[in-house]
Image (spheres, coloured by chain):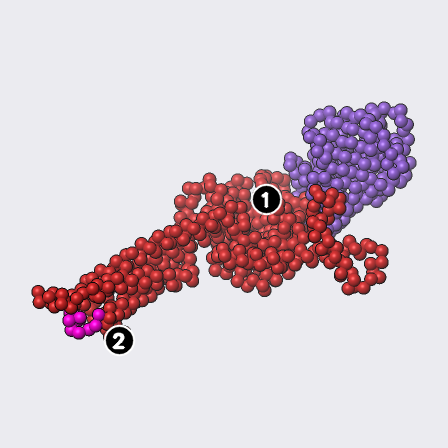
Chain colours: A purple, B red
Amino acid sequence: MIKILIFILSFTFLPGQSDDMSVQDIIKAMDDNLNAKSRILTSKMVVHGRRSTRTIESKNWVVGTDQAFTEYLSPPREAGTKMLKLGDKLWTYSPQTDRVIQISGHMLRQSVMGSDMSYNDMMEDRPLLELYDAKLEGSEEINGRDHWIMLLEAKEKGLSYPKRRAWVDKKYLLPMKEELYAKSGKLLKTASMDGIKKVQGRWFPTRFIFKDELKRNSKGTEWIIGEIQFDTDIPPSRFEKGRLRK
Amino acid sequence: MIKFLTKGLLRDRSRSLFPVLVITLTVALVVFAIGFMRGTMNSLFLDTAVILTGHEKIVTRAYNEESQLMPNDLALLDVGQLIHDLNQNYPDFFWSPRITFAGLLDVPDEDRETRSQGPVIAFGIDFLSDGSRQVEIWELERSIVSGNLPENRDDALISSKLADQLNIKAGESVTFIGSTMDNAFTTCNFNVSGTFNLRKGQTDKQMMLVDLSGARFALDMDDAASAIFGFTHSLYYDDEVAVALRTDYNNTKSGSIVQRLRNEQSEETLSYMNGWNRISKKEQESLTKQRTNGLNDNKMYNNAEEWGELSVEDPGIFSPFMLALRDGNQMGTMVDISGAMLAIMGGIFLVVVMVVLWNMGLMNGLRRYGEVGLRLAMGESKGQVYRSMISEAVIIGLTGTVIGTGIGLALTYYVQENGIDYTKGIEALSNSSMVMPNIFYAQVTPDLFYIGFIPGVLATVLGTMLAGLAIYKREMAQLFKELET
């Protein structure tokens, strides 16, 4: 999820680009922005299930691509649940059990809070330039706005999405729509965004919509960003494992 | 006349004691053999029913399609109301909710870090409600290896095989790691109140049993359940009754719930129309029904193949749907085969016994050849002699059958309550994945009260009648010749 967010956010840090910009330049610029020093954000995740809708509120602290801490604020059942990501390791803490559990192996494929995003989506934060070869497939006008169509193909094995296609707004430099594929070419997930605003000098989406295309009759998950602050000092103690129990 | 014949039978024991003994033993054997065969087959079904299928099982239609995946996101909702309705409409069964779920069981060390971990298949069973028979039907009191039965929401029973694998002892705490019914990651602590061994081979290899309330808390399934299991009060599975009940429920109750859910969806969709609130309630209802019927008639529910984006998700997939035991995986074939086997074995046994008793009746008649001759010589009519012999056969047959049925039923009831233990034999089959009973029980069924009358009375009387036919063949002249010699 954070990966997708960062991937999307990365475009926001680029100034307006022209058509003669190479794909490598775009990806490079994206990666530069992915490695933002830090950010703190509050968000609401609205999970549209087949029979009901749930809203989960959380606060996130992120430094670079290796450190992330999430605390869930509501609903009451989830309040107090915390997650810590350090490099390629992910732990979760539940106040009901008072246990810190490392999420690994097949558990990484599980959904985060029942949403359309998996823990794997949260884990793949490495620079896109390291992970993907990109090529420009063309341009397309959507809702009166020009977009590049970019195809990214994995350089290495084991990624959750070996192939992804993005429709990048040429002015906002945001992937307004993205399709995430398996190696076989099967569509796994789709992502889109809207509500673009300027935040701290950057174009920034306020709503993301993710949809797991493998879930039958999935109605998708909305991720609504409340407040976001960039380049704020976050003390290293925020990312200590002991912090999970506090 | 009957009194006279009875006195004769009692005073001449050679005519009554041996035949009554033979009929008693034979009828007792018939009653017990049929009761034991029925009970054995029922034991086989009951074990599968308790763990997997119930005599009846209610799930949502969507859950039924993906049941192998234990999809609790498709679980039944408003289970309390559903069970209340079932108890009212189908009182011959008792109904109990069940949650089936899977995940990882994590055992912490003293620092609450993972000491050991392994996959677990868990059942949330209604152990703690007043009047619940789940402990009885799971035979848990007999299966407990260490510790105690669950007494609280957080208590869990772990199979002794899983406990050995994870090195858990009664009294320790374990953490379940899995998914809620919303597919959210969840962790929940359980106290291991005890360990158990169902003695059914590999069936309980990764099994954990918790109270329904604990499972509901862990999986965020308030008033929800994977399934509702129904069992007859006698725990005897009658396939015809089960199939009739299932058909009735699905055609009436379930069908009406499908219609209601579809109408609710139609009403919600139509409520977004401009001016919806300005039309009368009656018109709203009419339009709602029209939409539902239109979608149904045009096969637009869940039909993306034909209708593409116009296809409508059928809310009826979340309606409850009843399955009889025979609807489970290959269980229908099992039920049919066992029914046929019972009929063939019972039939052959009955025929053999009838031949024996018929023969006894025949021999008994022929043995009294001289007596019959004397009675004819003394002036009794052939018809009188014939009728008196048949009457005696009826009295003997009835006496033997009543005593034999009593003994047979008593024996059957004893084995029904205590069973015959084949644990060692079943343990030897521990690699089998089939759910096998380790104690075989007999079963007293209504037909056992009358089945003994077929061989006991009918065969005896028929034999006597056949033997008695000779009376009519005897010529009086021949008779006096016989008497002279």
Q: Where does label 2 land, which residue?
A: B1
Q: Position of residue B161 (x, y in %)?
A: 50, 43
Same subunit: marks 1 and 2: yes
| Residue toward you, A108 or B5 | B5
Question: Is A91 colored magenta in this rendering?
Answer: no
Q: Quadrant of the N terminus of chain A?
A: top right
Residue B467 percent across, percent down from the top left: 23, 62
Amino acid carrying label 2: it is: Met
Q: Nearer the viewer, mark 1 or mark 2?
A: 2
**Nearer-N-terminus badge (1/2):** 2
Provide the residue span drawn in magenta. Answer: B374-382
Q: As displayed, is residue A211 above or below residue B452?
A: above
Badge 1: how crowded within 10 Å, few (<14), some, or many (20+)?
few
Residue at the image point whose x is 59% and y is 64% from the top: B88
Location of residue B106 (image quadrant): top right
Query: Residue tagged by mark 1?
Result: B68
